[in-house]
Amino acid sequence: MTAVEAMHRVAEPSRSGKGRKVCRVGLIIMGVLSCILTQGVDAQIGPPDMSVERGGFYKLSAVAGLSESQLWAVGWNSLVRFDGAGWVLEHSFPADQEWTRLEAGESAIYGIGHLCNLLEIRDKLHVVHTIPNTCHLHDLSIISDGDVWLAGGDATDKKSHIVRWKDGKSQDVVVPDVGQITAIYMNNDLTGWAFGPRGILKGADGEWKIHQPGLLNQYSIRAIDASSPNDIWAVGGTSMFDSDNVQLILHYDGQQWSVWRQWDRHHEGSHRRLNDIAMFDDGTGWAVGDGFDIF
C-alpha cells in the first residue's frame, strides 16, 4: 500500500466514534508532506480530492478538527485555522511556547506543549490555561469537554505527574513515580493507563498502581489508543530523546500487556520510533512514525 493510499484510508470516518482522532492522524501525515513540498512547487498527489497546500507556516506539529471546516493546527509558536477555503494564522504565541499535541472533544479542542499550559479552543476563541506544578506536558486524554487528563513531569526531579483539568480547575492525581509520563489513555474518569520510562501505571477505581513491572525496560511509549477496554494498543521506541532507536508496538488483551512487534533499526530499513496510533472498533488501526513509516 502506498503512502497516498494509507493517508486516504486513515482519513475515512471511524465507526467507533474515534473519527476525529483518526482524521487528526491522517492530516498529520499530509502536514509532513506539506512541509516538504513547501520547499518546492505546489503539487497535487493521489486521487483528485487529495491535495497538498503550501501554507507558509513554520513547523506545525499537530492538527485536530471538529468537522471538515473546523480544523486547527499548532506548532512552535503558531495557531492556524482552516476557514473552509484555506489556512490562516490565528495567533502567534511567545517564542518559547511550542505546542506538540491536539485532541478534539465533542465541541472543543485541547492542546499541550513544552510549557505548563493547556490550550482550549471553542468556536473561534482560544484560551491558554496554566497548569501548576508540571513543567512538561507530553500527552492528554479527553473524557469529555471540560474534563481532560494531562500527563508529563517536572524538568528537575523527572517525577511522574498526572493532572485532571475539570471545569476550569486542575487537580494533581497521586500516582507512583515511574518517571515523566509520556503517554496516557483514560477509558473513563476512574480507569486508564499511563506510561513512563520506568513502568506502566494502571488506574482502577480512582487508584493508580504499577502494572507488570519490568516490561518496558528501555522503551518509551508515545501514544495509546483502543478499540475497546480489552483491546488497547501503545506505540513508541527505545528512548523518547534518542533518535537512533527501534520501533515498538505493545498490546493489551484485557489481562496483560505484551510486545506485539518490535523492529530493530538494523533490519527492515532505517526505522525510528512510532509517534501516534488510531484504532477502529473492528480492531484495525494505523500507526505513524519517524522516517515516513505508516503501519
Image (cartoon, rainbow, N blue to C red):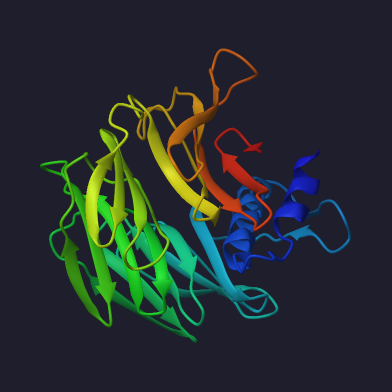
Figure label count: 0
Pick whichever, 159 or 189, lies toward us.
Answer: 189
Q: Where does residue 128 sit, x and y in percent of width and height?
A: 30, 74
Q: Where does residue 167 sit, x and y in percent of width and height?
A: 28, 82
Asked whether residue 114 is in view, the answer is no
**Viewport quadrant of the N terminus:** top right
Residue extending furthest toward the right = 48
Residue beneath the point at 10% across and 42% down: 157
Residue extending furthest toward the top = 266
Residue 79 is left or right of residue 202, and the answer is right
Pick whichever, 15 or 22, lies toward us.
Answer: 15
Asked whether residue 207 is in view, the answer is yes
Residue beneath the point at 50% across and 56% down: 60
Residue beneath the point at 45% across and 23% down: 245
Dividing the picture into quadrants, the one containing residue 270 is top right
Residue 295 is left or right of residue 154, and the answer is right
Residue extending furthest toward the front = 255
Residue 60 is left or right of residue 295, and the answer is left
Q: Where does residue 153 sit, x and y in percent of width and height?
A: 21, 49
**Viewport quadrant of the C terminus:** top right
Q: Where does residue 212 sit, x and y in percent of width and height?
A: 32, 34
Residue beneath the point at 46% across and 79% down: 108
Residue 221 is left or right of residue 115, and the answer is right
